[in-house]
Structures are given as C-alpha cells and as structure tokens.
Amino acid sequence: SEATKLQDILRLLHLWFNHGHKHFVSEALLNGFNFVIVDTWLDVIPQIIARLQTAQKDIAALIQKLLIKVGQIHPQALVYALAVASKSMTSGPQNGDSQKEQKEKPKKNEKLDVIEYVLDKMREHSPSLVEQAFLVSQELIRSAIL
C-alpha cells in the first residue's frame, strides 16, 4: 500500500547500504532496479545521494546506475541535489591539513566522480536544466554569504 511504501523503501536502503558489498545482494538490487518503477526512488533521493560519501565502490556503482536511471525520467528530481552535493564535495575543509583529511580526499574524489558522471549523463538530455540548477545553487550560496 502507499502508506508503507516509504517505510519499505527505507528498509531496502538499509539492507542495500549495509550488505550491498556482497555480490548476491548487489545482483538482486541491480535486477530489482529493472522491475521497480523509477518513481519509487524519488522520496529517498537525498538519502541515496548522502550515502555516496560513505559508500564502498560497489555500492557507489549501484547508486550511480540508479541515479542515471532516475535522471533519465525525472532529471528535475535529481539535478539540484546533485549540484549542491557536487559543490559541497569540491569545497571541502579549507583550514587544516591533517593526515586524516588528506587520506579522505581520494574517497571524496571518487564520490565526486560518480556525481559528475551522473550530471554528464543528465547533460546529454537536459543540458539547460543542469546549467540552471548550478546557477541557482551558486546564487543561493552567494546570497547566503552576503
């Protein structure tokens, strides 16, 4: 039913992010992406994008595939969230060069690569939407600083 759909998808995300590194789980998810309607994922886009920062490579690859699929049908649902995530990952911590922060940089670059790849795929079919989303996010940041 519609009332339990969000609860069910959140449970699935929990399983995905905790066990998606196992081959049989990732295969089941990949197969499921073809059977579940894309609209199902719209309510949990922020949670999915947030997991890019902590996901393992195989989980990140599945996230990328799902985001591309959602972006083809509902680019407006993804573009602003991806633009903000892209900006937040490129602006990172600016003061302090501790070893811990330096070790985390490659992981952030991998996640940024996933976001940039999804955005590039979206630019193929919705270039003005992507550019306008970046303009809006840039202006919001600029106005917040003022």
Image (cartoon, rainbow, N blue to C red):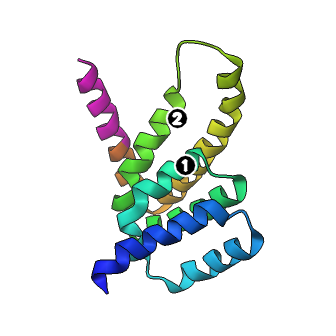
Say whether residue 145 is magenta. yes
Q: Nearer the viewer, residue 37 or 19?
A: 19
In this picture, is 116 found above or below 102? below
Residue designated by label 2: 89
Q: Please tell me which residue is depicted at 72% across the width and 28% down the height of the picture.
A: 103
Nearer the observer: mark 1 or 2; the answer is 2
Cβ atoms under marks 1 and 2 closer than 8 Å: yes
The quadrant where residue 32 appears: bottom right
- In the image, the segment drawn in magenta is 134-146
Gap in Å between the C-alphas at discs 1 and 2? Answer: 10 Å
Side of 9 relative to 62 (left or right)? left
Image quarter where the N terminus lies is bottom left
What residue do we see at 38% from left, 45% from top?
131
Element assignment for label 2:
helix
The disc at residue 115 is 1
Q: Does the rendering let one see residue 126? A: no
- Where residue 93 appears, as percent x and y from the top left, is 53, 22
Q: Which amino acid does label 1 sit on?
A: Ile
